[in-house]
Image (cartoon, rainbow, N blue to C red):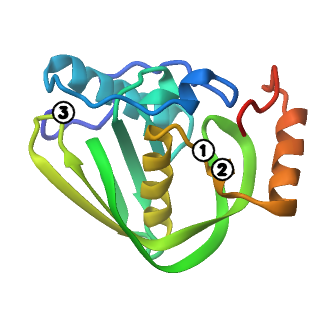
Amino acid sequence: MRRGTIPGSSGRVRPMRLLGDPGLGAPCEEVTDFGAELSALIEDMFATMYAASGVGLAANQIGVPLRVFVYDCPDDEDRRHLGHLVNPRLVAAEGITVRGPEGCLSVPGIEAATPRFDEAVVEGFTADGAPARVRGTGFFARCLQHECDHLEGGLYLDHVTGLRRRRALRAVRRAPWATAGPSGA
């Protein structure tokens, strides 16, 4: 991404994969080529995330099984965090556990109270291959954990239990976008 450009402004919006798509349930592969193709993917991911009014997007949500995510997410103090991570690893998730509303662009229109740690640290690389470390608190920590889950083949619904889970899955079955129901959810 060139300096001074708006992320996603040169990208194209790609179709979103929805719950039930097998690509969402499989761990993603490491990125080995840090070239122009990766930069174009990141641009497309930003364009897709913004078109869907999201705060984060993992590559497998648009059908690319690579360890990449983008974000444009506020924290609890309304500070904006904007960026991307390649080959990210959640290296710390700590602090208090907060159960808060969480949704997903691959499960549109359905939220569930999901427990997440209030602090998270993710390490990875930029599109240029430079090491990167991102620390988040509050809502941004939730976003970081959510996107890392995607890259491991997980969804926020995997963290929801009991009555909250049953309600969320019932909403999925009734959702207009649901075709075959929540496989693996």
Left or right: residue 136 compared with residue 49: left
Answer above or below: position of 73 versus 115: above
Q: In terms of sequence position, does the residue under pointer 3 or pointer 1 come before the other?
A: 3
Q: Position of residue 53 (x, y in %)?
A: 55, 41
Q: Secondary structure at mark 2?
A: helix
Crowding near pointer 3: few (<14 within 10 Å), some, many (20+)?
Answer: some
Q: Of the residues tagged 3 and 2, which is closer to the observer?
A: 2
Residue 92 x %, y %: 34, 67
Residue appearing at x 82%, y 38% in the figure: 172
Q: Which residue is mark 2?
A: 158
Q: Which residue is mark 3?
A: 1
At 65% across and 27% down in the image, what residue appears?
18
**Residue 151 image offset from top left, x and y in percent:** 43, 39
Residue 83 visible in rendering: no
* Residue drawn 28% across the image and 31% down it: 30
Q: Which mark is residue 103?
A: none
Give, as a three-letter code, the residue at label 1.
Leu
Q: Say whether disc 3 or disc 2 marks the residue closer to the N-terminus.
A: 3
Q: Is residue 29 above or below residue 92?
A: above
Quarter of the image that includes the N terminus: top left
Contact (Cβ within 8 Å) of mark 2 with mark 1: yes
Q: CA distance from mark 3 to mark 2?
A: 33 Å
Q: Tell me the CA gap for discs 2 and 1.
A: 6 Å
Q: CA distance from mark 3 to mark 1?
A: 28 Å
Task: Give the image location of residue 69, x and y in percent.
Answer: 37, 40
Residue at label 1?
155
